[in-house]
Amino acid sequence: MNVIKVLSKVEEAAGLSRSLPPEVFYNALISDKMDVQDHYTAWRQAQELAQGRDPPADAPFSFCSYPFLLNARAKAHLLALEARFIMEQSVAHARMEVQLYGGGGAARRRAEEGPVLRGHGKGGGGSSGSAGSAGSGGGGGDATGTPRQGLVSGSRAGGVVGSGSAGGGGGGNSRTPSVGRGYPWQRQRSGGASGSGSSSPEAAAGGSSNGGGSGRSSSRRASRSDAAASRASSPSSSGSSTGGSGSSSGVTSSLRNLFGLWRNRAARPTTSSSGSGSGEAPGRCGGGSHELPPPSRCSVPGVHSDMCIVRVRRSHLVEDALEEVGRQTRSDLLKPLRIHFIGEEGIDAGGVKKEFFALLMERLLDPGNGLMAYDTASRTYWFNASSLEPASSYFLLGLVLGLAVYNRVLLGFTAPPLLYQKLRGGRELGLRDLEGWQPELARGLRQVLEYDGPEPLADVFGLTFSVDVERFGAIETVPLKPGGEQVLVTEANRAEYVSLMAAWHMEVATARQFEAFAAGFRVLCQGPAMSLFNAQELERLVCGNPRLDFTALREAARYDGGYSRSSAAVGWLWDIVLNELGPEDQRAFLKFFTGSDRSPLGGLGSLRPVIQRDGPDSHKLPTAHTCFNTLLLPEYASRAKLLRLLRLAINNSEGFGLQ
């Protein structure tokens, strides 16, 4: 015990000096053998006792009190345990409300709680703090007894993912084709797709959902048959709304303004059809097909006591996703997430969520939208300091990120380590943090600090306490302190200048954007277990392990349906993946196989992939059960044929269909 306490002091000193990376303190034996549930329970008990009026001298021991010993994978297990508990408690509470008050009473309670976007619709980035969560904002407790603590990760429930033929026959099992290659908000919405934001919330009881216990299964498809396109694009039979938004008029107005910005910023000229009486070009799922109904008018209910339901159209992905997420109450967001692509038959048992978040983040991070800026030097995204987007836009971006983390979905969100250190908090930022994001700027500031030439620093550099900022084509001089544009930087004050300049870039310039983003992220990611993560581990929790070890994936693979490790097709497959495919195609294969091109914290070997025989040699393309990391591979007669069809499949896969 004394050794652990000494190590704790060493780790604390190393963290302040940043002389040692966090992983040198990991203990593999403790991380792998620790009983997660027992130690988490003891840790929470110790925290509660310590906060009591008369804390005991000896609190229950837990390795969670010394998180530097635990690797990121062990901490992820703790987060999963906490999130699963919160999800189960939220679902039980919602079911109890329905039993006690009926569907109407539950709907009234949801209306009273209000959408999670409330308070951010007017551009404000702040949020109410949660008790016991230092430095965090957003998502305070609700009045109905729903747990105040959100966290990351959760159990996957519902649905079994299956597969069918992806051959070129264009039959009823063909994969839903991808819809358009332009961004969804570049298309105008038709009149029937708008104006649903003020409808009353649904009853939480009854109604089937896309995550329910259907015996049918969804799978990723690679074929693009016209028959499937026509069928997937037709609207649901009812067309009536079974789920409203539950949002107030102020929030609805804010969302509409936000969506208007999305559409108008990057709108492209479109040619209206001859039969249309307006200049609008609604998004379509195939030539000549009917427009899909908006979320509020699709057949899938918007509220369910057992899950948080988000319904989107591929042709309006950003608009629908942000509106659906923004209308949720916090107590709904704490339930397991289920994604429904309108017009598609896939059941979300994990794979649909992965594709949804991957597509959504790709569009949200597009620098052309003005929300985030891409830095080519560090190859990372950062908040656009010149953005005119309201704070609600960044709140929703943070909420989407937190929702993915809470539901254990990895994202391609390549932000600098600085972002995760700011989210983590706990220490002041310095030049080392700036180096990971703006290396050239940090190098220049170090030159100012270290200059020791014969000429005065003011004569050599000619700097003042100000920064020039380009905004909409014009250069604006911003003082770093009152009257700073008139104060020269000299040997006597250069340390102050460097400190103010670094702080301006890392904190001041994008304070409004970051505060709103952080508030949205912490709506779900503010529970006690989150405090165990350092900044590097938090980054991997969001983005996964940067190393893609396909050899580990091969070694962990299991085989079914007649295949074994010695099967010829299996040998060809791994030889192609390891030696034939380039890095981009390898990522495409991983995404086709598992629904994500990211590696989890435990590495690719922790995915426990399955290679299953899908019949004899044929012209069928490979298919995948992304929810269960299962690849269905026909027993092709030659390596060349397997390579050709595999490339075709992994480069043309989007959407889900029923078996």
Image (tube, helix red, strand yellow):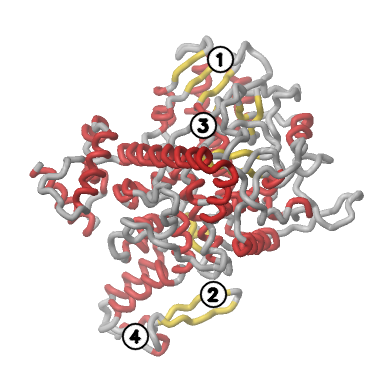
- In the rendered image, which residue does mark 2 sit on? 470
Residue type at numbered disc 2: Glu
Read off the residue under disc 1.
613
Q: CA distance from mark 1 to mark 2?
A: 58 Å
Rendered residue at 11%/45% (across/down): 58
- Disc 2 is placed on an element classified as strand
Q: Which residue is mark 3?
A: 594
SS under mark 4: helix
In front: label 2 or label 4? 2
Q: In the image, is residue 39 above or below residue 558?
A: below
Residue lying at 50% horizontally and 41% vertically, measured from the top left: 100
Position of 464 compared to 585: left or right? left
Rendered-image quadrant of the N terminus:
top left
Instruction: Point out the tag, 2 or 4, that comes first from the N-terminus.
Output: 4
| Between marks 1 and 2 in the image, the one whose residue lies nearer the viewer | 1
**Residue 11 location, x and y as percent?**
19, 51
Q: Is residue 343 left or right of residue 603?
A: right
Identity of the amino acid at label 3? Answer: Thr
The amino acid at mark 4 is Ala
**Cα separation between marks 3 and 2:** 43 Å
